[in-house]
Image: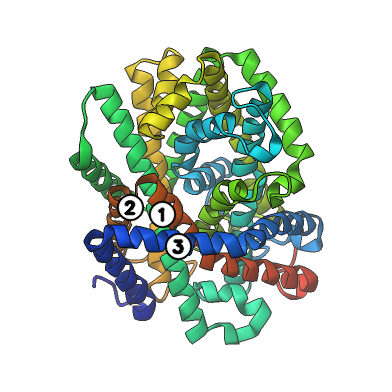
Amino acid sequence: MPASPKHPLNRPVFFTPLAVLLAAVILSLWQGVAVLAAETAINDWILRHFSPLFAWSGLAFLALLAGIAVSPLGGQIIGGAGAKPILTRWRWFAVTLCTTIATGILFWGAAEPLFHLNDPPAMLGLKPGSDAAATFAMSTMFLHWTLTPYAIYTVAGLAFALVYYNRREPFSLSSLFVPLLGQRAHGPMGTGIDIICLYALVAGMAASMGAGILALAGGIEGIGGFAGGTPLRWAIAAAIVGSFLISAATGLQKGIAGLSVLNTWIFFAIIAFVLIAGPTAQMFDLTLRGTFDYFQTFIPRNLGLDVDTDWHRQWTIFNWANWFAWAPVTALFLARLAVGYSVRAFILYNLILPSLFGAVWMTAIAGATIALDQQSGASLYALLTAKGPDPVLFRLFSALGGGPGVAALVLFAIFLSYVAGADANVSAMSALSTSGITPDAPEAPLGVQAVWGITVGLVALVLVASGGIDGIRMMSVLGGFPALFVIIGAALSLIVMAVRGRHETAPAQS
């Protein structure tokens, strides 16, 4: 296995999840129906027994971050008073945004609100397609794509930033538990945590890449007027993997940061086009109603107290599980970006600003989707139920008067989104599975990154081929379940560090 004397492989952490994942791929290809049935059974068991823990954790993380922001810990500088930032604030925002949302906000921004508009929870008594259902749909998009999910990433990333840069603990997820357990956190237990979280992230990344492959294939087939089938999906996967490995080889400043800045500007261009071309007055009215409903129902809707239990599990908890699956290893990368900035700045750039972007994105994309579906007698929903979520986003832009050029721009944004996110996370995964990673030598060998990138691509293709969107959704839950307990541990460590304050971290800087 390609590695270097400076960064030798951490063999248990590298080979164990890799072997399990490859075995799962082979088994899925051999016994696809049986594997999907087993996934379904495990998925249902997790959702039935642990939904409350997922739900309460999200709310608790938000409360914790609010408390930290106003505590003395909020003034601490990540890396110590003399630490220098490696990114400007604009590039920090762009990289954080593009490496955390991946393809989800594009793929689901148009498809998800159609489900909520035309099939709202029975418990609410809303007429499908009505204005009340539209308000619920927009409120739900704010719930699923703003504060609560970003709190999951922020808690994990902030905890790792403090233990890695300020306490100088090793580049391992077990370091998250040092404030709780002391040096006992390292050793066999720490290795086990790294293995589980690597497996969880590959599950989450494969789910996201599977969604990206479907969205890209749907767009290419729509523009080209042909059915590409399996060969097209293989070609898309190969292009994605190849691109993020090239990006990885060029380093943070030129690779991930450059892609992210470009992608962020494309995001803003897409938002501007939709706001100009769409039914703007209706979209803003819908946003105001949705925002009011979001805050009015924030606690009960997060906890699933005012909606059907099955709906809450299949939508809200599914979303949280997907974010949890990414969170442990994504935290390693987010922590790396934050050196030289304060804890409060970390909360601003990882929680508040991405949440505001998510709200603006949903105002445009979800708002236009809901408005056009209502105006057209549920034509977009009919397309969704007939052909799945793949072509919905492109039909939306076609309805807004966007020609092939706009469709191509959206395709490019989807592609860049996944490449930037995958580059960041494969970088973190590879660093986790090698030894000798330090703030001064943060990158794992490219060969190790190539193995993880190809593995993610293979798992994603198997998901698309065997389980389609249902398989993708279940893989997200399966990956998020073990990660849930890791992030809860990270939150408890943050509490310990906040309580001990200056005794646990470097001196504050004004």
Question: What residue lies at 34% left-to-right and 19% top-to-bottom?
Answer: 405
Q: Secondary structure at mark 2?
A: helix
Residue neighbourhood size for the residue with mark 1, other residues' Cα within 10 Å, grouped as few (<14), some (14–19), many (≥20): many
Q: Residue at x 59, y 50 (%)?
A: 310
* Residue 39: image tag: none
Query: Marks 2 and 3, Cα distance to the nearest angstrom?
Result: 17 Å
Query: Which image quarter holds the C terminus?
Result: bottom right
Instruction: Please name which of the two marks, 1 or 2, marks the residue nearer to the observer.
Output: 2
Q: Please name the residue shown 45% across and 41% down the image.
A: 260
How far across and how far down the image is residue 221, in percent? 26, 28
Distance, label 1 to label 2, CA atoms, is 11 Å
| Disc 1 to disc 3, C-alpha distance | 22 Å
Residue furthest left in the image: 231
Dot 2 amino acid type: Leu
> Along the polypeptide, which appears first: circle 1 or circle 2?
1
Residue 138 visible somewhere in the drawing = yes
Q: Nearer the viewer, mark 1 or mark 3?
A: 3
Q: Is residue 111 left or right of residue 433?
A: right
Using the image, tell me which numbered label, if any, was put on residue 463. 2
Going from N to C along the chain, the mark reached first, 2 or 3, is 3
**Disc 3: which residue:** 41
Q: Name the residue type under label 3.
A: Ala
Return the residue nearer the eye: 132 or 449.
132
Q: Label for residue 205?
A: 1
Find out whether the residues at labels 1 and 2 contact each other: C-beta distance under 8 Å: no
x and y percentages locating residue 406 in the rendered image: 38, 20
Please, what secondary structure does the residue beneath circle 3 have?
Answer: helix
Could you say which is closer to the camera, residue 45 or residue 196?
45
Q: Is residue 38 above or below residue 184?
A: above
